[in-house]
Image (cartoon, rainbow, N blue to C red):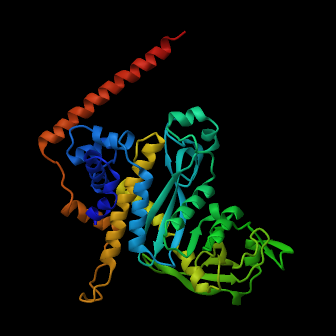
């Protein structure tokens, strides 16, 4: 599978050196190393210096978007299903300084508060066959797009203007559908569901959706004459309106919730465009906590279909966890526009290796007993096996000592440069 994923985009490199470096980069992201920066990846690959890895991210000639397209096509070929779900979501990386592309003080769910951070918007693909991330965009706040000199210093193309996170998510959904990725639904959290503009986007593509909205979301009732908060609607429902159903299998068994469904809700913000609007309400059976979803389908759909789509949205969180914990999605130390897209694309390639391998091993074999007494292979366990059986590590003493000396010399030069810069600032009148 590693060779298959690497092979799907090998033709995007015109020269053998960056092609080999890209293969070593993805392999290094899967390796059991502490931090996945260019230095550590080069040492893992057996290079004497990090130049090849740094050149791959900064100066080598290759198109990260074209590689992204190849990966998306590979995933769609393996996981493709007409009832698959496209799931946009965002994740933040805490950063220091002000020069890394997209960085500013902003809210990020990673920290749960406003921090100096960089936010990336991603698109996940989930079907009954498996799930993984297939696209990415870096979010540029207005403080960046209004400062073209700052954008130019970070390598942001001149044609890139401000776009909200919802607009970035909509662009990725359009790109996936235009590329022929089979899908029937979209799912997202409140950050996207509360936007009527975003809700209109999947409807324009004939894509059904189950989008979370806030408890204060106003639901038009009585032909649009009355607008009632979603939590008020839930409070007025009789006990007979609730049904207990599973949102899918979890690590501890079926995820049962109580559900209420208001079918064919009239709406003014989302006009009638040939489909059916509805409101779905989920209640936690233990805590009583409520969650609300605006739903739309281009043709009549059942409650079971909407519950399935609502339940599958969590797979994007699982993909983020695997991407950060297993292939170092959040460990990049790059500042420029191209470098971020290149690193992130190669991380998605490494994640695809794990996701497809996990799906392949989960396929029931008729020659195998139905109960082996073991859970199916997880992405975490597959990565451990890859490190045990596939990846070659350069553990010889000379190689390790060479890198120890190289790091210390480089850090000494960096320290001298920082001291010189600081002293020059102090001596200025």
Q: Is residue 191 above or below residue 415?
A: below
* Residue 21 screen position, x and y as percent: 28, 47
Instruction: Decide if residue 329 is in sight here.
Output: no
Q: Is residue 285 above or below residue 353?
A: below
- Number of marks present in the image shown: 0
* Residue 425 screen position, x and y as percent: 49, 16
Quadrant containing the N terminus is: bottom left
Residue at screen point 44% across, 16% down: 423
Q: Nearer the viewer, residue 96 or 363?
A: 363
Which quadrant of the structure image shows residue 385? Answer: bottom left
Residue at screen point 38% across, 73% down: 78
* Residue 403 screen position, x and y as percent: 21, 37
Q: Nearer the viewer, residue 146 or 364?
A: 146
Looking at this rendering, what residue extends furthest in the right direction?
Answer: 225
Which quadrant of the structure image shows residue 273? Answer: bottom right
Which quadrant of the structure image shows residue 323? Answer: bottom left
Quadrant containing the C terminus is: top right
Q: Nearer the viewer, residue 381 or 301?
A: 301
* Residue 359 screen position, x and y as percent: 35, 74
Looking at this rendering, what residue extends furthest in the top direction?
Answer: 429
Left or right relative to 187: residue 364: left
Residue at screen point 26% across, 31% down: 408
Left or right relative to 211: residue 330: left
Residue at screen point 28% across, 83% down: 373
Looking at this rendering, what residue extends furthest in the front direction?
Answer: 14
Left or right relative to 43: residue 81: right
Q: Is residue 266 above or below residue 74?
A: below
Q: Is residue 337 above or below residue 392?
A: above
């Amino acid at each position: 599978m590693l060779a298959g994923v690497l092979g799907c985009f090998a033709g995007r490199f015109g020269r053998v050196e960056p092609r080999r470096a890209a293969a070593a980069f993805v392999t290094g992201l899967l390796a059991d190393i502490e931090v996945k920066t260019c230095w550590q990846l080069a040492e893992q690959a057996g290079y004497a210096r990090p130049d090849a890895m740094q050149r791959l991210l900064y100066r080598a000639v290759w198109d990260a978007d074209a590689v992204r397209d190849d990966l998306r096509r590979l995933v769609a070929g393996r996981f493709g299903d007409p009832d698959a779900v496209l799931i946009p979501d965002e994740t933040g990386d805490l950063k220091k300084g002000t020069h890394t592309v997209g960085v500013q003080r902003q809210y990020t769910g990673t920290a749960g508060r406003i921090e100096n951070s960089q936010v990336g918007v991603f698109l996940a693909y989930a079907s009954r066959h498996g799930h993984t991330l297939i696209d990415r965009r870096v979010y540029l706040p207005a403080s960046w797009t209004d400062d073209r000199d700052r954008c130019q210093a970070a390598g942001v193309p001149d044609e890139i203007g401000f776009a909200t996170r919802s607009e970035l998510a909509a662009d990725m959904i359009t790109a996936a559908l235009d590329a022929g990725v089979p899908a029937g639904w979209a799912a997202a959290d409140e950050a996207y569901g509360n936007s009527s503009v975003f809700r209109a986007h999947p409807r324009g593509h004939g894509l059904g959706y189950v989008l979370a909205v806030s408890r204060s979301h106003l639901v038009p009732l009585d032909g649009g004459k009355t607008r009632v908060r979603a939590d008020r609607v839930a409070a007025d429902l009789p006990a007979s309106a609730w049904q207990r159903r599973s949102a899918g299998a979890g690590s501890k068994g079926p995820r049962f919730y109580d559900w209420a469904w208001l079918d064919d809700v009239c709406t003014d913000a989302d006009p009638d465009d040939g489909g059916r609007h509805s409101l779905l309400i989920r209640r936690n059976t233990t805590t009583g906590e409520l969650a609300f979803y605006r739903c739309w389908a281009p043709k009549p759909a059942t409650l079971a279909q909407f519950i399935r789509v609502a339940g599958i949205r969590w797979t994007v969180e699982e993909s983020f966890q695997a991407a950060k914990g297993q292939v170092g999605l959040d460990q990049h130390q790059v500042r420029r526009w191209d470098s971020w897209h290149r690193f992130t694309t190669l991380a998605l390639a490494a994640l695809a290796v794990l996701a497809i391998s996990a799906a392949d091993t989960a396929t029931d074999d008729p020659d195998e007993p139905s109960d082996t007494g073991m859970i199916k292979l997880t992405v975490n366990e597959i990565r451990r096996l890859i490190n045990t059986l596939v990846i070659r590590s350069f553990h010889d003493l000379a190689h390790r000592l060479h890198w120890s000396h190289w790091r210390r010399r480089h850090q000494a030069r960096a320290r001298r440069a920082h001291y010189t810069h600081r002293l020059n600032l102090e001596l200025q009148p």
